[in-house]
Amino acid sequence: MTISFNQSPQNARILSVGAYRPPRVVQNGEIAPRIDSSDEWIQQRTGIISRHFASPDESLIDMAFKSAEIAIARAGLTFEDIDAVIFATISYPFQAPSAATELLTRLNNSTAAAFDISAACAGFCYGVAIANDMVRSHTAKNVLVVGAEKLSDYTDPDDRATAFIFADGAGSVVIGVSDHVGIGPTVWGSNSQTRDAIVLNPSYLEYKNNPGKLDIGWPNISQQGQTVFRWAVYAVAPIALQALAAAGMEPDQLDAFIPHQANERIIDSLVKSMKLPESVAVARDIRTTGNTSSASIPLAMDALLTERPDLHGKSALLVGFGAGLVYAGQVVELPPIPQKSN
Ligand code: UT7
């Protein structure tokens, strides 16, 4: 038997980005009293000044849809043009049907390939990697990659270790065919020995020893902040530099750096360890968005392009890292000026 695969690889790039932030802005002062903290402590330790929380009747899918419709319109496409949806999230409560298929019905598109990925704060970069390979191999033409989270539903407002960090929002990109390389090779992997450092349901630890049915209730995130912080500052810079080298670039050839928005001190440390020159624009969306896990990189990308429209079409190094612990990074060409702006 001979199986044929006659098409030669084609190039892919990000055609557009869309973002959605829920209207409700939550200042540190609203969070701090319940956890015996202060606006000053939260700003000094994380850089976060405020974040957005969805309203109780606003779902993860509502937010994802709003970011997706902007991205699709900016790419000059219609909902029917999307032939695959990759939905990165850790805050959709159901294993099946997937959030991706739920989103598809909102897009009035009932035929595209659709699946969710669970790679936490690296989820968006995992999605970009997969979408790039799908377009390169002709498996799909226009892939919608969504990162969306409603983490306010999964955060205990009385937990001193997490209540001030996590937030809500959604970001989407459309990845499609290009006449040149618009997405570099992805460097990805994991440090699974440290997977207990961020857990979205404390019952996970019990389940490891007793894998039967558990009365798990509604889950909340717990994290060993210092363990994750230390890992991020020593492990992520070399990964990001590998992604840059894999794209054949030097730090001074880069136009922008858009890391996962976990903590501004982590961002500062990465910039320093990587010796990024001042000419590289650094995304610091965390200040007014908080940590939105899978959504943080597309949200930060959209914010950076709003602030610096001259960066449309320029290069950016993306790097995501988080629960698992998992990571992924790649150099991309930022999307061009939208064909239609919303
Ligand atoms: O996106 C997923 C990946 N997640 C991350 O990347 C998160 C990484 N970790 C972090 O960003 C940081 O570890 C945190 C922001 C979570 C915590 O900051 P930290 O500098 O690591 O704080 P710490 O736990 O080392 O605590 C330092 C001090 C302690 O007081 P003493 O012992 O120095 O007197 C804590 O008791 O700060 C105190 N503290 C607080 N004070 C006010 C701890 N939590 C709080 C709080 N408010 N919420």
Image (cartoon, rainbow, N blue to C red):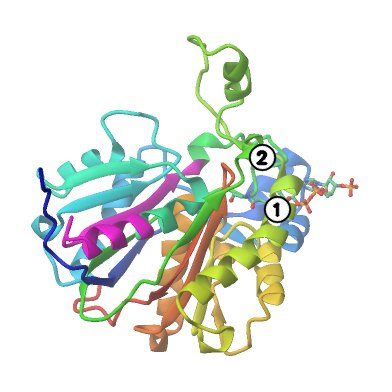
Mark identifier at residue 16: none
* Residue type pointed to by label 1: Trp
* Residue type pointed to by label 2: Thr
Quadrant housing the C terminus: bottom left
Residue in the foreground of this view, choosing between 76 and 7: 7
Question: Is 84 on the left-hand or right-hand side of 296?
Answer: left
Relative to 105, is 271 above or below?
Answer: below
Which residue appears at 47% of the width and 67% of the height? 300
Segment tinted magenta in the rendering = 129-151
The residue under label 1 is 231
- Helix, strand or loop under label 1: helix
Q: Position of residue 49 (x, y in %)?
A: 63, 62
Relative to 314, is 23 above or below?
Answer: above
Quadrant housing the N terminus: top left
- Helix, strand or loop under label 2: helix
Q: Position of residue 277 (x, y in %)?
A: 63, 87
